[in-house]
Amino acid sequence: MYLSGRAGGASTGSVTTHTELGLKVTDFFDYQVMDPGSSTVDQPVTNYMWSVDQNLFQNGTSTGPFTDNERTFCRPRRLEVYVLPIKGFSYSDLAPSATPNETNADAQFTVQAQVPGCATPIVTSGGVPGKPRALAADTQVTNVLPQIDTFWKKVLSCNLQKTFQSGVMRPYFDSTGVEATSMCLFQMQIVKPTTGTSYLTGDQSQPLNIRVKVVVHVDQPIATIQNAKLAVFRNESFLYPTTNQNGSVYPGTVSSYVQTDLDKVNNHMR
Protein backbone atom coordinates (compact mmCIF):
# COMPACT_ATOMS: atom_id res chain seq x y z
CA MET A 1 0.00 0.00 0.00
CA TYR A 2 2.43 2.63 -1.24
CA LEU A 3 -0.18 5.40 -1.19
CA SER A 4 -0.49 5.21 2.60
CA GLY A 5 3.26 5.47 3.16
CA ARG A 6 5.24 8.23 4.75
CA ALA A 7 4.57 11.87 3.86
CA GLY A 8 1.32 11.09 2.09
CA GLY A 9 2.71 8.46 -0.22
CA ALA A 10 5.99 10.23 -0.98
CA SER A 11 8.13 7.33 0.20
CA THR A 12 10.41 5.37 -2.10
CA GLY A 13 8.41 3.31 -4.57
CA SER A 14 5.23 5.38 -4.25
CA VAL A 15 2.58 5.24 -6.98
CA THR A 16 2.33 8.48 -8.98
CA THR A 17 -0.10 7.54 -11.76
CA HIS A 18 -3.07 5.24 -11.25
CA THR A 19 -6.26 7.28 -11.76
CA GLU A 20 -8.95 6.72 -14.37
CA LEU A 21 -10.87 9.79 -15.50
CA GLY A 22 -14.66 9.60 -15.59
CA LEU A 23 -15.89 11.72 -18.48
CA LYS A 24 -19.34 12.54 -19.83
CA VAL A 25 -19.44 13.11 -23.59
CA THR A 26 -22.58 14.61 -25.20
CA ASP A 27 -23.24 14.40 -28.93
CA PHE A 28 -26.13 15.42 -31.20
CA PHE A 29 -27.10 14.11 -34.62
CA ASP A 30 -30.16 14.05 -36.88
CA TYR A 31 -31.89 10.75 -37.59
CA GLN A 32 -32.61 10.25 -41.27
CA VAL A 33 -33.01 7.32 -43.65
CA MET A 34 -31.71 8.81 -46.90
CA ASP A 35 -28.72 7.00 -48.36
CA PRO A 36 -26.19 9.60 -49.55
CA GLY A 37 -24.95 7.17 -52.18
CA SER A 38 -28.31 6.04 -53.53
CA SER A 39 -31.73 7.61 -54.04
CA THR A 40 -33.60 4.30 -54.13
CA VAL A 41 -32.47 2.45 -50.99
CA ASP A 42 -33.67 3.68 -47.59
CA GLN A 43 -31.43 3.04 -44.60
CA PRO A 44 -33.68 3.22 -41.52
CA VAL A 45 -31.20 1.65 -39.05
CA THR A 46 -28.70 4.04 -37.46
CA ASN A 47 -25.56 2.47 -35.97
CA TYR A 48 -23.67 4.67 -33.50
CA MET A 49 -19.96 3.86 -33.47
CA TRP A 50 -17.29 4.85 -30.95
CA SER A 51 -13.52 4.43 -31.24
CA VAL A 52 -11.93 2.92 -28.14
CA ASP A 53 -8.48 3.83 -29.50
CA GLN A 54 -8.45 7.49 -28.51
CA ASN A 55 -7.22 9.68 -25.71
CA LEU A 56 -9.54 12.60 -25.01
CA PHE A 57 -6.73 14.23 -22.99
CA GLN A 58 -3.88 13.39 -25.29
CA ASN A 59 -0.70 15.08 -24.14
CA GLY A 60 1.61 12.11 -24.28
CA THR A 61 4.65 11.49 -26.40
CA SER A 62 5.51 8.95 -29.05
CA THR A 63 9.19 9.83 -29.35
CA GLY A 64 11.86 7.20 -28.79
CA PRO A 65 12.72 5.02 -27.12
CA PHE A 66 8.97 4.75 -26.39
CA THR A 67 6.38 4.70 -29.17
CA ASP A 68 2.62 5.22 -28.90
CA ASN A 69 2.60 5.17 -25.10
CA GLU A 70 0.02 7.96 -25.02
CA ARG A 71 -2.65 5.62 -26.40
CA THR A 72 -5.19 4.44 -23.85
CA PHE A 73 -8.39 2.37 -24.00
CA CYS A 74 -11.23 4.91 -24.08
CA ARG A 75 -13.90 2.63 -22.63
CA PRO A 76 -17.61 3.53 -22.72
CA ARG A 77 -19.13 2.50 -19.40
CA ARG A 78 -22.71 3.77 -19.66
CA LEU A 79 -24.86 5.58 -22.20
CA GLU A 80 -28.21 7.32 -22.55
CA VAL A 81 -30.01 8.15 -25.78
CA TYR A 82 -32.71 10.83 -26.11
CA VAL A 83 -34.87 12.07 -28.97
CA LEU A 84 -36.65 15.37 -29.43
CA PRO A 85 -40.43 14.95 -29.95
CA ILE A 86 -42.15 16.52 -32.92
CA LYS A 87 -44.41 19.52 -32.43
CA GLY A 88 -47.94 18.41 -31.73
CA PHE A 89 -49.90 20.69 -34.04
CA SER A 90 -50.45 21.15 -37.75
CA TYR A 91 -48.03 23.52 -39.43
CA SER A 92 -49.05 23.20 -43.05
CA ASP A 93 -48.74 26.96 -43.33
CA LEU A 94 -45.11 26.78 -42.21
CA ALA A 95 -43.92 23.65 -44.03
CA PRO A 96 -44.86 21.57 -47.05
CA SER A 97 -48.08 19.62 -46.55
CA ALA A 98 -46.26 16.43 -47.54
CA THR A 99 -44.43 16.32 -44.22
CA PRO A 100 -45.77 13.74 -41.72
CA ASN A 101 -46.13 16.33 -38.96
CA GLU A 102 -49.74 17.29 -39.73
CA THR A 103 -51.73 15.87 -36.81
CA ASN A 104 -51.06 14.49 -33.36
CA ALA A 105 -51.52 10.96 -34.70
CA ASP A 106 -49.06 11.52 -37.51
CA ALA A 107 -46.56 13.11 -35.16
CA GLN A 108 -46.36 10.06 -32.89
CA PHE A 109 -43.46 7.74 -33.60
CA THR A 110 -41.85 4.69 -32.00
CA VAL A 111 -38.14 4.34 -31.32
CA GLN A 112 -36.69 0.84 -31.35
CA ALA A 113 -33.25 0.92 -29.77
CA GLN A 114 -30.82 -1.79 -28.82
CA VAL A 115 -27.25 -2.36 -27.70
CA PRO A 116 -25.70 -5.05 -29.90
CA GLY A 117 -23.57 -7.87 -28.60
CA CYS A 118 -21.93 -10.81 -30.30
CA ALA A 119 -20.17 -14.07 -29.62
CA THR A 120 -16.68 -15.09 -30.65
CA PRO A 121 -16.51 -15.28 -34.47
CA ILE A 122 -17.14 -18.75 -35.81
CA VAL A 123 -13.98 -20.26 -37.29
CA THR A 124 -14.52 -22.02 -40.59
CA SER A 125 -12.87 -25.28 -41.54
CA GLY A 126 -10.20 -23.33 -43.40
CA GLY A 127 -9.21 -21.51 -40.21
CA VAL A 128 -10.63 -18.18 -41.37
CA PRO A 129 -12.76 -16.44 -38.71
CA GLY A 130 -16.24 -15.54 -39.85
CA LYS A 131 -17.93 -12.21 -39.29
CA PRO A 132 -19.90 -12.10 -36.03
CA ARG A 133 -23.57 -11.17 -36.16
CA ALA A 134 -24.89 -8.42 -33.95
CA LEU A 135 -27.62 -9.69 -31.60
CA ALA A 136 -29.76 -7.47 -29.39
CA ALA A 137 -28.49 -7.33 -25.81
CA ASP A 138 -30.19 -4.39 -24.08
CA THR A 139 -33.41 -3.37 -25.82
CA GLN A 140 -35.95 -0.59 -25.36
CA VAL A 141 -39.06 0.36 -27.36
CA THR A 142 -40.41 3.84 -26.65
CA ASN A 143 -43.49 5.61 -27.99
CA VAL A 144 -42.74 9.30 -28.37
CA LEU A 145 -45.79 11.55 -28.27
CA PRO A 146 -45.94 15.00 -29.88
CA GLN A 147 -45.35 17.94 -27.57
CA ILE A 148 -45.63 21.69 -27.86
CA ASP A 149 -43.18 22.34 -25.04
CA THR A 150 -39.61 21.23 -25.65
CA PHE A 151 -38.07 18.37 -23.71
CA TRP A 152 -35.87 15.35 -24.36
CA LYS A 153 -37.43 11.89 -24.26
CA LYS A 154 -35.11 9.09 -23.13
CA VAL A 155 -35.31 6.12 -25.49
CA LEU A 156 -32.39 4.00 -24.28
CA SER A 157 -30.32 3.63 -21.16
CA CYS A 158 -27.66 0.98 -20.82
CA ASN A 159 -24.95 0.15 -18.30
CA LEU A 160 -22.34 -1.28 -20.64
CA GLN A 161 -20.22 -2.37 -17.68
CA LYS A 162 -22.94 -4.75 -16.47
CA THR A 163 -24.00 -5.86 -19.95
CA PHE A 164 -20.60 -7.18 -20.95
CA GLN A 165 -19.01 -8.05 -17.62
CA SER A 166 -19.85 -11.76 -17.72
CA GLY A 167 -17.81 -12.54 -20.83
CA VAL A 168 -20.65 -14.59 -22.34
CA MET A 169 -20.96 -11.96 -25.03
CA ARG A 170 -18.72 -9.11 -26.08
CA PRO A 171 -19.35 -5.70 -27.66
CA TYR A 172 -19.68 -5.57 -31.42
CA PHE A 173 -16.64 -4.12 -33.19
CA ASP A 174 -16.18 -3.32 -36.86
CA SER A 175 -15.64 -6.53 -38.84
CA THR A 176 -15.04 -4.95 -42.25
CA GLY A 177 -11.37 -4.23 -41.63
CA VAL A 178 -11.81 -0.46 -41.94
CA GLU A 179 -11.36 0.29 -38.22
CA ALA A 180 -11.18 -2.66 -35.85
CA THR A 181 -11.40 -0.35 -32.82
CA SER A 182 -14.88 0.98 -33.77
CA MET A 183 -17.36 -0.21 -31.14
CA CYS A 184 -21.07 -0.10 -31.91
CA LEU A 185 -22.63 1.51 -28.84
CA PHE A 186 -26.24 1.24 -29.97
CA GLN A 187 -28.57 0.85 -32.94
CA MET A 188 -31.89 2.56 -33.46
CA GLN A 189 -34.79 2.69 -35.88
CA ILE A 190 -37.83 4.98 -35.82
CA VAL A 191 -41.03 3.31 -37.01
CA LYS A 192 -44.75 3.98 -37.24
CA PRO A 193 -46.52 2.79 -34.06
CA THR A 194 -49.42 1.25 -35.97
CA THR A 195 -47.55 -0.77 -38.59
CA GLY A 196 -43.94 -1.05 -37.46
CA THR A 197 -42.75 0.20 -40.84
CA SER A 198 -40.23 2.99 -41.25
CA TYR A 199 -41.52 6.36 -40.05
CA LEU A 200 -39.43 8.31 -42.55
CA THR A 201 -38.57 7.52 -46.14
CA GLY A 202 -35.84 8.66 -48.45
CA ASP A 203 -38.32 10.82 -50.33
CA GLN A 204 -36.88 14.31 -50.53
CA SER A 205 -40.41 15.73 -50.19
CA GLN A 206 -40.26 14.66 -46.53
CA PRO A 207 -37.26 16.64 -45.25
CA LEU A 208 -38.05 15.93 -41.60
CA ASN A 209 -35.09 15.30 -39.29
CA ILE A 210 -35.45 13.93 -35.78
CA ARG A 211 -32.81 15.26 -33.42
CA VAL A 212 -31.05 12.67 -31.24
CA LYS A 213 -28.89 13.33 -28.18
CA VAL A 214 -26.33 10.77 -27.03
CA VAL A 215 -24.64 10.91 -23.63
CA VAL A 216 -21.67 8.57 -23.23
CA HIS A 217 -19.99 8.07 -19.86
CA VAL A 218 -16.39 7.17 -20.57
CA ASP A 219 -13.56 5.77 -18.48
CA GLN A 220 -10.33 7.34 -19.75
CA PRO A 221 -7.07 6.15 -18.17
CA ILE A 222 -4.23 8.62 -17.82
CA ALA A 223 -1.41 7.66 -20.16
CA THR A 224 1.71 6.32 -18.51
CA ILE A 225 3.94 8.44 -20.76
CA GLN A 226 3.06 12.12 -20.28
CA ASN A 227 4.58 15.36 -21.52
CA ALA A 228 4.61 18.84 -19.99
CA LYS A 229 6.33 21.99 -21.20
CA LEU A 230 8.85 23.13 -18.59
CA ALA A 231 12.43 24.37 -18.21
CA VAL A 232 15.24 24.31 -15.64
CA PHE A 233 17.36 27.47 -15.94
CA ARG A 234 20.35 28.35 -13.74
CA ASN A 235 21.56 31.83 -12.89
CA GLU A 236 23.29 33.72 -10.07
CA SER A 237 20.45 35.79 -8.55
CA PHE A 238 16.94 35.51 -7.20
CA LEU A 239 16.05 38.90 -8.65
CA TYR A 240 15.68 37.98 -12.31
CA PRO A 241 14.76 34.32 -12.79
CA THR A 242 15.23 34.33 -16.56
CA THR A 243 18.45 36.40 -16.73
CA ASN A 244 21.97 35.02 -16.60
CA GLN A 245 24.93 37.35 -16.00
CA ASN A 246 27.23 34.97 -17.82
CA GLY A 247 25.42 35.65 -21.07
CA SER A 248 23.28 32.53 -21.34
CA VAL A 249 19.88 33.26 -22.89
CA TYR A 250 16.76 31.80 -21.34
CA PRO A 251 15.79 29.04 -23.83
CA GLY A 252 12.08 28.82 -22.99
CA THR A 253 10.15 25.76 -21.96
CA VAL A 254 10.46 22.47 -23.79
CA SER A 255 8.32 19.35 -23.84
CA SER A 256 9.57 16.99 -21.13
CA TYR A 257 8.54 13.67 -19.66
CA VAL A 258 6.48 13.87 -16.45
CA GLN A 259 4.25 11.57 -14.40
CA THR A 260 0.67 12.84 -14.11
CA ASP A 261 -2.26 11.82 -11.94
CA LEU A 262 -5.69 13.27 -11.15
CA ASP A 263 -5.66 14.87 -7.71
CA LYS A 264 -9.05 16.61 -7.45
CA VAL A 265 -11.75 18.37 -9.45
CA ASN A 266 -12.11 22.13 -9.06
CA ASN A 267 -14.54 24.68 -10.45
CA HIS A 268 -12.65 27.81 -9.44
CA MET A 269 -13.09 29.52 -12.82
CA ARG A 270 -16.84 29.82 -12.65
Image (tube, rainbow, N blue to C red):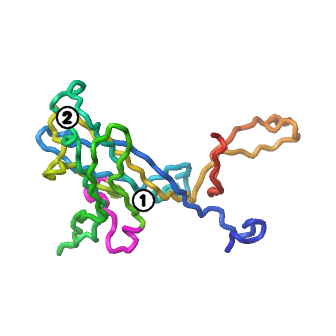
Residue 24 against residue 160 in the figure, above or below: above
Residue type indicated by callout 2: Glu
In the image as oriented, which residue stretches furthest toward the left?
A: 40
- What segment is highlighted magenta in the picture? 162-178
- Residue identified by numbered label 2: 102
Residue drawn at x 75%, y 66% as measured from the top left: 8
x, y percent for residue 92: 20, 28
- Residue identified by numbered label 1: 78
x, y percent for residue 179: 32, 54
Left or right of 135: which side holds 76?
A: right
Residue 53 magenta-highlighted: no
x, y percent for residue 13: 70, 70
The chief SS type of the magenta part is loop
Residue 247 against residue 174 in the figure, above or below: above
Residue type indicated by callout 1: Arg
Determine the secondary structure under disc 2: loop
Which of the two marks, 2 or 1, is nearer to us in this view?
Answer: 2
Residue drawn at x 55%, y 51% as measured from the top left: 61
Q: Quadrant of residue 243?
A: top right
Q: Which quarter of the rendered picture does the C terminus lie within?
A: top right
